[in-house]
Amino acid sequence: MFIAICGIEIHKEVFTLDSATCAACTYMMGAANEAKKTFGDAIDMVEYKFTLKENIARCKKMGVPNLPSMYINGELKFRSLVPSKEELEGAIRAAMK
């Protein structure tokens, strides 16, 4: 998932099996959508579903250890465990500094 905030480009990627069929992936995307509510139009999001062939290469390149996983600026921030709203917003704000 990619996020651009206030002109500062922050890359946030969420790798899922498929948020429509995987419960943990659904919760991870839910957390991302909550962050969207907080940061509004300053945030653009993209999900990388492992079920799509073109996304498998990205997963391998990033060395994704588990699904779902969330990276911010190329750094693994959350894997398997879904962050709370506060944890995710804190991680985004820290990346903005």
Image (cartoon, helix red, strand yellow):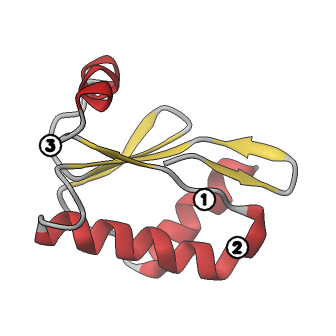
* Quarter holding residue 50: top left
Relative to residue 38, is residue 6 depicted above or below? Answer: above
- Nearer mark to the viewer, of 1 and 2: 2
Indicate the secondary structure of the residue bearing disc 1.
helix
Q: What amino acid is at disc 1?
A: Ile
First in residue order: circle 1 vs circle 2: 2
The circle drawn on residue 32 is: none
Q: Residue furthest right?
A: 7
Distance from label 3 to label 1 (Cα)?
21 Å
Q: Nearer the viewer, residue 65 or 24?
A: 24
First in residue order: circle 3 vs circle 1: 3
Q: State the image coordinates of residue 22 (x, y, percent, origin top left).
A: 12, 65
Q: What amino acid is at disc 2?
A: Phe
Q: State the image coordinates of residue 47 (x, y, percent, origin top left).
A: 40, 51
First in residue order: circle 2 vs circle 3: 2
Circles 1, 2 touching at the beta carbon (< 8 Å): yes
Distance from label 2 to label 3 (Cα)?
27 Å
Indicate the secondary structure of the residue bearing disc 2.
helix
- What crowding class fits label 1: few (fewer than 14 Cα within 10 Å), some (14-19), or many (20 or more)? many
Q: Residue at x 50, y 80 (%)?
A: 34
Indicate the secondary structure of the residue bearing disc 3.
loop
